[in-house]
Amino acid sequence: MKKMLTLLLALTLLFSTMAVSVSADTSEVTLTGEILTTIIDVDIPTCASFTINTNIAEGTEGRYVMPTLHIFNATTAPITLSIVGFDNKPESENQFTEVSRDDKDWASLGATESTSYIYLGITGEQDQSGFLNHTELFSIPSAVEVQSAEQQLCHIKSDMKVDLEIECQSGSAFPNAITSVYELIFVASLYEDVVEPSTITDLVVHDNLYFTWDASKGTEYLAMADDQMVTLTIVTNQPDTNYLVNGLDYFGSQTININTLILPDNHGRYITIEYLYDDTWFTKKIIINYTN
Amino acid sequence: MKRILIVLLVVTTLFSNSVFAQTGKTEVTGNIQPAIINVDIPSQASFIIDPNGPTFIAPELFICNNSTMPISVSMTSFDNKVDTPNQFEEVEKNEKDWWNLGTNGSKRFIYLGIGADDLYQEGYVEDKSWNEVISATQVQTETVECASIRPSHTVSLQMECNYGRAISGAFTTTYELVFIVSVMD
Protein backbone atom coordinates (compact mmCIF):
# COMPACT_ATOMS: atom_id res chain seq x y z
CA MET A 1 0.00 0.00 0.00
CA LYS A 2 1.46 3.24 -0.99
CA LYS A 3 0.84 6.08 1.39
CA MET A 4 1.53 9.33 -0.34
CA LEU A 5 0.09 12.33 1.35
CA THR A 6 -0.44 15.33 -0.83
CA LEU A 7 1.09 18.68 -0.14
CA LEU A 8 -2.34 20.07 0.47
CA LEU A 9 -3.01 17.50 3.15
CA ALA A 10 0.38 18.14 4.68
CA LEU A 11 -0.27 21.85 4.98
CA THR A 12 -3.67 21.25 6.48
CA LEU A 13 -2.14 19.00 9.06
CA LEU A 14 0.52 21.56 9.87
CA PHE A 15 -2.06 24.00 10.97
CA SER A 16 -4.22 21.54 12.79
CA THR A 17 -3.43 19.34 15.73
CA MET A 18 -3.01 16.24 13.60
CA ALA A 19 0.62 16.61 12.81
CA VAL A 20 1.15 13.18 14.38
CA SER A 21 -0.77 11.65 11.56
CA VAL A 22 1.90 12.72 9.21
CA SER A 23 4.67 11.15 11.22
CA ALA A 24 2.85 7.87 11.94
CA ASP A 25 0.78 5.79 9.65
CA THR A 26 -0.93 2.43 9.67
CA SER A 27 -0.73 -0.24 7.01
CA GLU A 28 -2.87 -3.35 6.91
CA VAL A 29 -1.73 -6.50 5.21
CA THR A 30 -4.24 -9.21 4.42
CA LEU A 31 -2.48 -12.53 4.56
CA THR A 32 -4.27 -15.47 3.02
CA GLY A 33 -3.14 -18.96 3.89
CA GLU A 34 -4.02 -22.00 1.85
CA ILE A 35 -3.67 -25.26 3.71
CA LEU A 36 -3.61 -28.38 1.57
CA THR A 37 -4.88 -31.85 2.40
CA THR A 38 -2.60 -34.47 3.85
CA ILE A 39 -2.03 -37.47 1.65
CA ILE A 40 -1.98 -40.75 3.53
CA ASP A 41 0.95 -42.91 2.58
CA VAL A 42 1.28 -46.20 4.45
CA ASP A 43 3.33 -49.20 3.43
CA ILE A 44 1.55 -52.46 4.17
CA PRO A 45 2.83 -55.76 2.78
CA THR A 46 0.59 -57.13 0.08
CA CYS A 47 1.59 -60.74 0.63
CA ALA A 48 2.50 -62.83 3.62
CA SER A 49 2.39 -66.53 4.35
CA PHE A 50 2.07 -68.82 7.30
CA THR A 51 2.75 -72.49 7.81
CA ILE A 52 1.20 -74.95 10.23
CA ASN A 53 3.27 -78.04 10.80
CA THR A 54 0.82 -80.39 12.40
CA ASN A 55 3.54 -82.91 13.18
CA ILE A 56 5.06 -80.61 15.75
CA ALA A 57 3.26 -80.64 19.06
CA GLU A 58 1.13 -77.73 20.14
CA GLY A 59 3.18 -75.28 22.19
CA THR A 60 6.41 -76.32 20.55
CA GLU A 61 8.46 -73.95 18.44
CA GLY A 62 7.97 -74.54 14.76
CA ARG A 63 4.38 -75.69 14.84
CA TYR A 64 3.15 -72.32 13.66
CA VAL A 65 5.45 -70.24 11.49
CA MET A 66 3.62 -66.95 11.36
CA PRO A 67 4.50 -63.75 9.53
CA THR A 68 5.21 -60.37 11.01
CA LEU A 69 3.59 -57.52 9.12
CA HIS A 70 5.69 -54.35 9.10
CA ILE A 71 3.35 -51.39 8.76
CA PHE A 72 5.26 -48.23 7.94
CA ASN A 73 3.62 -44.83 8.15
CA ALA A 74 5.21 -42.74 5.41
CA THR A 75 2.63 -40.00 5.87
CA THR A 76 3.92 -36.72 7.30
CA ALA A 77 1.23 -36.99 9.98
CA PRO A 78 0.33 -39.70 12.47
CA ILE A 79 -2.26 -42.22 11.35
CA THR A 80 -4.70 -44.59 12.96
CA LEU A 81 -4.59 -48.16 11.73
CA SER A 82 -7.65 -50.39 11.81
CA ILE A 83 -8.45 -53.77 10.34
CA VAL A 84 -11.78 -54.30 8.62
CA GLY A 85 -11.28 -57.61 6.83
CA PHE A 86 -9.75 -60.92 7.90
CA ASP A 87 -11.27 -63.85 6.04
CA ASN A 88 -10.60 -66.65 3.63
CA LYS A 89 -10.52 -65.47 0.06
CA PRO A 90 -13.62 -66.86 -1.70
CA GLU A 91 -11.54 -68.77 -4.22
CA SER A 92 -9.28 -70.27 -1.57
CA GLU A 93 -8.91 -74.02 -1.79
CA ASN A 94 -9.86 -74.72 1.79
CA GLN A 95 -12.50 -72.63 3.44
CA PHE A 96 -12.01 -72.55 7.19
CA THR A 97 -14.52 -71.34 9.69
CA GLU A 98 -12.64 -68.93 11.90
CA VAL A 99 -13.41 -69.24 15.57
CA SER A 100 -12.09 -67.87 18.84
CA ARG A 101 -9.10 -69.51 20.42
CA ASP A 102 -11.15 -70.98 23.24
CA ASP A 103 -14.02 -72.16 21.08
CA LYS A 104 -12.50 -75.54 20.39
CA ASP A 105 -10.61 -78.26 22.15
CA TRP A 106 -7.94 -78.18 19.48
CA ALA A 107 -6.09 -81.29 20.58
CA SER A 108 -9.23 -83.38 20.23
CA LEU A 109 -10.28 -82.31 16.75
CA GLY A 110 -10.57 -84.98 14.12
CA ALA A 111 -9.88 -84.70 10.40
CA THR A 112 -13.13 -83.03 9.45
CA GLU A 113 -13.03 -80.47 12.21
CA SER A 114 -9.30 -79.82 11.76
CA THR A 115 -9.88 -78.83 8.16
CA SER A 116 -12.98 -76.85 9.14
CA TYR A 117 -11.94 -74.70 12.09
CA ILE A 118 -9.05 -72.40 12.73
CA TYR A 119 -8.20 -69.60 15.07
CA LEU A 120 -6.36 -66.66 13.53
CA GLY A 121 -5.69 -63.38 15.24
CA ILE A 122 -3.54 -60.29 15.23
CA THR A 123 -1.23 -59.27 17.99
CA GLY A 124 1.80 -57.07 18.49
CA GLU A 125 4.50 -56.31 21.02
CA GLN A 126 4.05 -53.65 23.65
CA ASP A 127 6.01 -50.39 23.79
CA GLN A 128 6.76 -50.19 20.10
CA SER A 129 8.40 -46.88 19.30
CA GLY A 130 5.96 -46.30 16.47
CA PHE A 131 2.97 -46.14 18.80
CA LEU A 132 1.63 -42.66 19.40
CA ASN A 133 0.25 -41.92 22.87
CA HIS A 134 -0.26 -45.56 23.82
CA THR A 135 1.86 -48.53 24.77
CA GLU A 136 0.01 -51.51 23.41
CA LEU A 137 -2.40 -52.37 20.64
CA PHE A 138 -5.93 -51.15 21.29
CA SER A 139 -7.18 -54.61 20.45
CA ILE A 140 -5.68 -57.98 19.58
CA PRO A 141 -8.59 -59.15 17.51
CA SER A 142 -9.29 -62.58 16.19
CA ALA A 143 -10.38 -63.00 12.59
CA VAL A 144 -13.89 -63.74 13.80
CA GLU A 145 -13.96 -60.44 15.73
CA VAL A 146 -12.77 -58.53 12.68
CA GLN A 147 -15.52 -60.19 10.66
CA SER A 148 -18.12 -58.77 13.02
CA ALA A 149 -16.76 -55.23 13.42
CA GLU A 150 -13.88 -52.98 12.44
CA GLN A 151 -11.10 -53.20 14.98
CA GLN A 152 -8.87 -50.26 15.74
CA LEU A 153 -5.30 -51.39 16.28
CA CYS A 154 -3.00 -48.44 16.92
CA HIS A 155 -1.91 -44.89 16.17
CA ILE A 156 1.38 -44.80 14.29
CA LYS A 157 3.73 -41.83 14.37
CA SER A 158 4.89 -40.26 11.15
CA ASP A 159 7.88 -41.95 9.55
CA MET A 160 7.71 -44.85 11.99
CA LYS A 161 6.69 -48.50 11.76
CA VAL A 162 4.67 -50.87 13.84
CA ASP A 163 5.01 -54.64 13.68
CA LEU A 164 1.91 -56.78 13.75
CA GLU A 165 2.03 -60.50 14.22
CA ILE A 166 -0.44 -63.11 13.11
CA GLU A 167 -1.21 -65.86 15.58
CA CYS A 168 -2.92 -69.12 14.97
CA GLN A 169 -4.25 -72.31 16.52
CA SER A 170 -5.55 -75.32 14.70
CA GLY A 171 -6.36 -78.97 14.98
CA SER A 172 -3.70 -81.52 14.08
CA ALA A 173 -5.63 -84.10 12.06
CA PHE A 174 -4.99 -83.11 8.46
CA PRO A 175 -5.11 -86.09 6.12
CA ASN A 176 -3.55 -84.02 3.33
CA ALA A 177 -1.56 -80.87 3.07
CA ILE A 178 -3.76 -77.91 2.26
CA THR A 179 -3.30 -74.31 1.29
CA SER A 180 -5.58 -71.61 2.45
CA VAL A 181 -5.49 -67.98 1.39
CA TYR A 182 -6.63 -65.16 3.63
CA GLU A 183 -7.31 -61.57 2.87
CA LEU A 184 -6.62 -58.92 5.47
CA ILE A 185 -7.92 -55.43 4.83
CA PHE A 186 -6.44 -52.54 6.78
CA VAL A 187 -7.70 -49.00 6.93
CA ALA A 188 -5.33 -46.14 7.62
CA SER A 189 -6.81 -42.76 8.48
CA LEU A 190 -5.40 -39.54 9.86
CA TYR A 191 -5.09 -39.64 13.62
CA GLU A 192 -7.88 -37.69 15.27
CA ASP A 193 -6.55 -36.21 18.47
CA VAL A 194 -8.67 -34.97 21.30
CA VAL A 195 -8.08 -31.34 22.05
CA GLU A 196 -9.01 -30.56 25.61
CA PRO A 197 -11.35 -27.62 25.95
CA SER A 198 -9.70 -24.66 27.54
CA THR A 199 -10.90 -24.47 31.14
CA ILE A 200 -10.10 -24.10 34.85
CA THR A 201 -8.72 -27.33 36.28
CA ASP A 202 -8.22 -26.29 39.90
CA LEU A 203 -8.95 -23.47 42.27
CA VAL A 204 -7.45 -23.00 45.71
CA VAL A 205 -9.02 -20.60 48.21
CA HIS A 206 -6.21 -19.39 50.45
CA ASP A 207 -6.77 -19.68 54.20
CA ASN A 208 -9.46 -22.28 53.63
CA LEU A 209 -8.67 -25.98 53.81
CA TYR A 210 -12.12 -27.27 52.99
CA PHE A 211 -12.70 -25.97 49.50
CA THR A 212 -12.09 -28.45 46.71
CA TRP A 213 -12.57 -27.61 43.08
CA ASP A 214 -15.58 -29.13 41.38
CA ALA A 215 -16.25 -27.52 38.01
CA SER A 216 -19.81 -28.80 37.92
CA LYS A 217 -20.97 -27.19 41.19
CA GLY A 218 -22.85 -23.96 40.69
CA THR A 219 -23.05 -22.65 44.24
CA GLU A 220 -20.71 -23.38 47.13
CA TYR A 221 -20.58 -22.10 50.69
CA LEU A 222 -17.45 -21.22 52.63
CA ALA A 223 -16.61 -19.91 56.05
CA MET A 224 -13.72 -17.47 56.06
CA ALA A 225 -12.05 -15.43 58.80
CA ASP A 226 -11.60 -12.53 56.40
CA ASP A 227 -14.52 -12.27 54.05
CA GLN A 228 -13.70 -8.86 52.58
CA MET A 229 -10.79 -9.94 50.44
CA VAL A 230 -10.02 -13.48 49.34
CA THR A 231 -6.90 -14.81 47.68
CA LEU A 232 -7.50 -17.38 44.97
CA THR A 233 -5.05 -19.49 43.03
CA ILE A 234 -6.62 -20.50 39.76
CA VAL A 235 -5.08 -23.21 37.61
CA THR A 236 -6.00 -23.53 33.94
CA ASN A 237 -5.09 -26.22 31.42
CA GLN A 238 -3.93 -23.70 28.85
CA PRO A 239 -1.96 -20.48 29.28
CA ASP A 240 -4.60 -18.41 27.52
CA THR A 241 -7.68 -19.89 29.15
CA ASN A 242 -10.11 -17.05 29.72
CA TYR A 243 -12.35 -16.74 32.78
CA LEU A 244 -14.01 -14.00 34.76
CA VAL A 245 -13.86 -13.40 38.49
CA ASN A 246 -16.47 -10.96 39.72
CA GLY A 247 -16.88 -9.89 36.12
CA LEU A 248 -13.21 -9.11 35.53
CA ASP A 249 -11.31 -10.84 32.74
CA TYR A 250 -8.37 -13.10 33.57
CA PHE A 251 -6.21 -15.42 31.47
CA GLY A 252 -4.23 -18.49 32.47
CA SER A 253 -3.08 -19.77 35.84
CA GLN A 254 -2.53 -17.11 38.46
CA THR A 255 -3.03 -16.04 42.05
CA ILE A 256 -5.34 -13.07 42.55
CA ASN A 257 -6.72 -11.04 45.42
CA ILE A 258 -10.41 -10.44 45.02
CA ASN A 259 -12.68 -8.08 46.90
CA THR A 260 -15.80 -10.02 47.72
CA LEU A 261 -19.24 -8.64 46.91
CA ILE A 262 -22.17 -8.21 49.31
CA LEU A 263 -25.11 -10.55 48.97
CA PRO A 264 -28.57 -8.97 48.68
CA ASP A 265 -30.06 -8.23 52.11
CA ASN A 266 -26.54 -8.46 53.51
CA HIS A 267 -26.73 -12.21 54.10
CA GLY A 268 -23.03 -12.62 53.46
CA ARG A 269 -20.51 -12.04 50.72
CA TYR A 270 -19.74 -13.80 47.49
CA ILE A 271 -17.46 -14.26 44.49
CA THR A 272 -18.54 -15.30 41.01
CA ILE A 273 -16.31 -17.25 38.66
CA GLU A 274 -17.33 -17.70 35.06
CA TYR A 275 -15.54 -20.31 32.94
CA LEU A 276 -16.05 -22.74 30.11
CA TYR A 277 -17.46 -26.06 31.22
CA ASP A 278 -18.74 -28.63 28.73
CA ASP A 279 -18.23 -26.07 25.97
CA THR A 280 -20.59 -23.56 27.55
CA TRP A 281 -20.03 -20.68 29.92
CA PHE A 282 -20.77 -21.71 33.48
CA THR A 283 -21.03 -19.53 36.58
CA LYS A 284 -19.90 -20.69 39.98
CA LYS A 285 -20.95 -18.61 42.96
CA ILE A 286 -18.89 -19.01 46.12
CA ILE A 287 -20.89 -17.66 49.06
CA ILE A 288 -18.82 -16.69 52.08
CA ASN A 289 -20.06 -16.56 55.67
CA TYR A 290 -23.70 -16.92 54.73
CA THR A 291 -26.24 -15.98 57.44
CA ASN A 292 -30.01 -16.24 57.35
CA MET B 1 22.48 72.90 -6.26
CA LYS B 2 24.26 69.65 -6.67
CA ARG B 3 26.95 70.57 -4.13
CA ILE B 4 24.35 71.54 -1.51
CA LEU B 5 22.69 68.18 -1.71
CA ILE B 6 25.93 66.32 -1.23
CA VAL B 7 26.78 68.29 1.88
CA LEU B 8 23.40 67.69 3.37
CA LEU B 9 23.69 63.97 2.86
CA VAL B 10 27.10 63.84 4.51
CA VAL B 11 25.84 65.76 7.48
CA THR B 12 22.85 63.51 7.86
CA THR B 13 24.98 60.41 7.73
CA LEU B 14 27.41 61.64 10.33
CA PHE B 15 24.54 62.66 12.53
CA SER B 16 22.83 59.32 12.47
CA ASN B 17 25.94 57.27 13.08
CA SER B 18 27.36 59.14 15.90
CA VAL B 19 24.36 60.23 17.93
CA PHE B 20 21.83 57.30 18.01
CA ALA B 21 22.05 53.51 18.71
CA GLN B 22 19.32 51.52 17.15
CA THR B 23 18.10 47.90 17.34
CA GLY B 24 16.98 46.30 14.17
CA LYS B 25 14.37 43.52 14.33
CA THR B 26 13.87 41.27 11.41
CA GLU B 27 11.02 38.82 11.50
CA VAL B 28 11.86 35.68 9.63
CA THR B 29 9.03 33.21 9.13
CA GLY B 30 10.15 29.67 8.64
CA ASN B 31 7.72 27.40 6.95
CA ILE B 32 8.85 23.88 7.68
CA GLN B 33 6.93 21.19 5.95
CA PRO B 34 5.98 18.17 8.03
CA ALA B 35 7.74 14.94 7.36
CA ILE B 36 5.63 12.88 5.05
CA ILE B 37 5.84 9.19 5.48
CA ASN B 38 5.93 7.38 2.22
CA VAL B 39 6.28 3.68 2.77
CA ASP B 40 5.32 0.81 0.54
CA ILE B 41 4.00 -2.23 2.34
CA PRO B 42 2.12 -4.87 0.35
CA SER B 43 -1.55 -4.90 1.17
CA GLN B 44 -1.96 -8.54 0.15
CA ALA B 45 0.20 -11.57 0.75
CA SER B 46 -0.36 -15.28 0.87
CA PHE B 47 1.16 -18.47 2.11
CA ILE B 48 0.66 -22.14 1.38
CA ILE B 49 1.01 -25.01 3.79
CA ASP B 50 1.51 -28.34 2.10
CA PRO B 51 1.56 -30.89 4.90
CA ASN B 52 2.89 -33.56 2.56
CA GLY B 53 6.26 -31.92 1.97
CA PRO B 54 5.96 -30.76 4.50
CA THR B 55 6.44 -27.31 3.09
CA PHE B 56 5.52 -23.81 4.05
CA ILE B 57 5.71 -21.43 1.13
CA ALA B 58 5.44 -17.73 1.74
CA PRO B 59 6.74 -14.91 -0.43
CA GLU B 60 9.09 -12.31 0.98
CA LEU B 61 7.39 -9.17 2.21
CA PHE B 62 9.14 -5.99 1.21
CA ILE B 63 8.90 -2.78 3.18
CA CYS B 64 10.20 0.13 1.18
CA ASN B 65 10.82 3.42 2.91
CA ASN B 66 10.43 6.07 0.24
CA SER B 67 10.43 8.81 2.85
CA THR B 68 13.29 11.24 3.26
CA MET B 69 13.86 10.24 6.88
CA PRO B 70 14.31 6.99 8.73
CA ILE B 71 11.12 5.34 9.88
CA SER B 72 10.28 2.86 12.61
CA VAL B 73 7.99 -0.09 12.01
CA SER B 74 5.82 -1.64 14.70
CA MET B 75 3.18 -4.34 14.56
CA THR B 76 -0.10 -3.95 16.41
CA SER B 77 -2.13 -6.80 15.01
CA PHE B 78 -1.40 -10.29 13.72
CA ASP B 79 -4.51 -12.39 13.97
CA ASN B 80 -7.08 -14.34 12.03
CA LYS B 81 -9.65 -12.11 10.41
CA VAL B 82 -12.91 -12.38 12.27
CA ASP B 83 -14.84 -13.65 9.26
CA THR B 84 -12.31 -16.28 8.16
CA PRO B 85 -13.82 -19.77 8.15
CA ASN B 86 -11.05 -21.50 10.07
CA GLN B 87 -10.02 -19.76 13.26
CA PHE B 88 -6.61 -20.93 14.36
CA GLU B 89 -5.34 -20.52 17.87
CA GLU B 90 -1.88 -19.05 17.45
CA VAL B 91 0.74 -20.49 19.77
CA GLU B 92 4.48 -20.20 20.25
CA LYS B 93 6.94 -21.98 17.98
CA ASN B 94 7.69 -24.94 20.20
CA GLU B 95 4.52 -25.05 22.21
CA LYS B 96 3.16 -28.09 20.37
CA ASP B 97 4.47 -31.44 19.25
CA TRP B 98 3.73 -30.46 15.65
CA TRP B 99 4.63 -33.81 14.09
CA ASN B 100 2.23 -35.70 16.28
CA LEU B 101 -0.81 -33.46 16.15
CA GLY B 102 -3.91 -35.18 14.86
CA THR B 103 -6.64 -33.73 12.71
CA ASN B 104 -8.20 -31.65 15.48
CA GLY B 105 -4.95 -30.20 16.74
CA SER B 106 -3.74 -29.52 13.21
CA LYS B 107 -6.85 -27.55 12.43
CA ARG B 108 -6.74 -25.65 15.70
CA PHE B 109 -3.14 -24.66 16.35
CA ILE B 110 -0.58 -22.77 14.31
CA TYR B 111 2.59 -20.83 14.90
CA LEU B 112 3.17 -17.83 12.65
CA GLY B 113 6.04 -15.42 12.90
CA ILE B 114 7.63 -12.73 10.80
CA GLY B 115 11.28 -11.80 10.82
CA ALA B 116 14.12 -10.36 8.79
CA ASP B 117 15.06 -12.20 5.65
CA ASP B 118 18.60 -11.04 6.35
CA LEU B 119 19.57 -9.24 9.54
CA TYR B 120 22.40 -7.42 7.83
CA GLN B 121 20.42 -5.75 5.10
CA GLU B 122 21.66 -2.29 4.31
CA GLY B 123 18.19 -0.90 4.77
CA TYR B 124 18.18 -1.24 8.53
CA VAL B 125 19.29 1.63 10.72
CA GLU B 126 22.33 0.55 12.70
CA ASP B 127 21.35 -1.34 15.86
CA LYS B 128 17.72 -1.25 14.84
CA SER B 129 17.46 -4.36 12.70
CA TRP B 130 14.54 -6.73 12.79
CA ASN B 131 16.48 -8.76 15.33
CA GLU B 132 14.05 -11.49 16.22
CA VAL B 133 11.17 -13.27 14.65
CA ILE B 134 7.99 -11.75 15.97
CA SER B 135 5.23 -14.23 16.60
CA ALA B 136 1.54 -13.62 16.18
CA THR B 137 1.04 -14.35 19.89
CA GLN B 138 3.56 -11.63 20.84
CA VAL B 139 1.73 -9.09 18.75
CA GLN B 140 -1.60 -10.17 20.20
CA THR B 141 -0.25 -9.36 23.66
CA GLU B 142 1.22 -5.95 22.91
CA THR B 143 2.42 -3.69 20.14
CA VAL B 144 5.87 -4.84 19.11
CA GLU B 145 8.49 -2.45 17.82
CA CYS B 146 10.17 -4.25 14.97
CA ALA B 147 12.89 -2.23 13.28
CA SER B 148 13.91 1.10 11.77
CA ILE B 149 14.53 1.56 8.08
CA ARG B 150 16.79 4.07 6.39
CA PRO B 151 15.28 6.52 3.92
CA SER B 152 15.11 5.31 0.34
CA HIS B 153 15.82 1.74 1.36
CA THR B 154 13.93 -1.51 1.25
CA VAL B 155 14.08 -4.43 3.63
CA SER B 156 12.65 -7.87 3.06
CA LEU B 157 10.85 -9.98 5.61
CA GLN B 158 10.29 -13.68 5.77
CA MET B 159 7.45 -15.48 7.46
CA GLU B 160 7.83 -18.68 9.38
CA CYS B 161 5.24 -21.18 10.44
CA ASN B 162 4.84 -24.36 12.42
CA TYR B 163 1.77 -26.47 11.87
CA GLY B 164 0.27 -29.88 12.34
CA ARG B 165 0.45 -32.24 9.41
CA ALA B 166 -2.88 -34.02 9.77
CA ILE B 167 -5.09 -31.94 7.51
CA SER B 168 -8.18 -33.89 6.58
CA GLY B 169 -9.47 -31.37 4.07
CA ALA B 170 -8.01 -28.34 2.35
CA PHE B 171 -9.08 -24.96 3.65
CA THR B 172 -8.18 -21.31 3.54
CA THR B 173 -7.51 -18.97 6.39
CA THR B 174 -7.05 -15.22 6.35
CA TYR B 175 -4.89 -13.13 8.62
CA GLU B 176 -4.68 -9.44 9.13
CA LEU B 177 -1.37 -7.82 9.95
CA VAL B 178 -1.34 -4.20 10.99
CA PHE B 179 1.91 -2.25 10.83
CA ILE B 180 2.44 1.18 12.30
CA VAL B 181 5.03 3.24 10.55
CA SER B 182 6.33 6.35 12.29
CA VAL B 183 9.21 8.76 11.97
CA MET B 184 12.12 7.27 13.89
CA ASP B 185 12.76 8.91 17.26
Image (spheres, coloured by chain):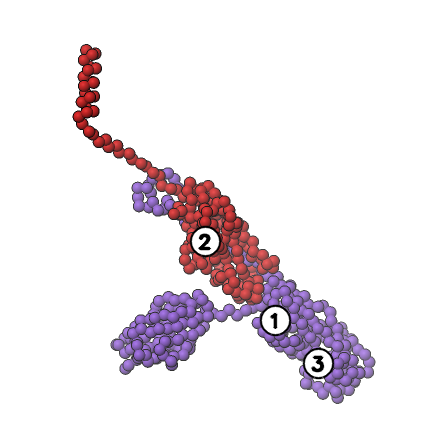
Chain colours: A purple, B red
Numbered disc in front, either 3 or 2? 2
Q: Quadrant of residue A201?
A: bottom left
- Count the numbered circles shown: 3
Circles 2 and 1 in contact, beta carbons < 8 Å: no
Q: Is residue A197 above or below residue A103?
A: above
The amino acid pointed to by label 1 is Phe
Q: Is residue A33 above or below residue A282?
A: above
Q: Position of residue A213 (x, y in %)?
A: 41, 77
Residue designated by label 3: A119
Q: Quadrant of residue A219?
A: bottom left
The chain under label 2 reads: B
Q: Quadrant of residue A251?
A: bottom left
Q: Residues within 10 Å of mark 2 (few under 14, many from 20)?
A: many
The amino acid pointed to by label 2 is Leu
CA separation in Å, label 1 and label 3: 26 Å
- At a point 51% along the width and 50% down the height, the residue shown is B119
Residue situated in front as seen by the camera: A280 or B138: B138
- At a point 22% along the width and 31% down the height, the residue shown is B23
Residue designated by label 2: B177
Q: Position of residue B112 (x, y in %)?
A: 50, 57
Q: Residues within 10 Å of mark 1 (few under 14, many from 20)?
A: many
The chain under label 1 reads: A
Q: Position of residue B139 (x, y in %)?
A: 44, 57
- Residue B86 numbered mark, or none: none
Circles 3 and 2 in contact, beta carbons < 8 Å: no
- Residue A131 numbered mark, or none: 1
Mark 3 secondary-structure assignment: strand
CA separation in Å, label 3 and label 2: 62 Å
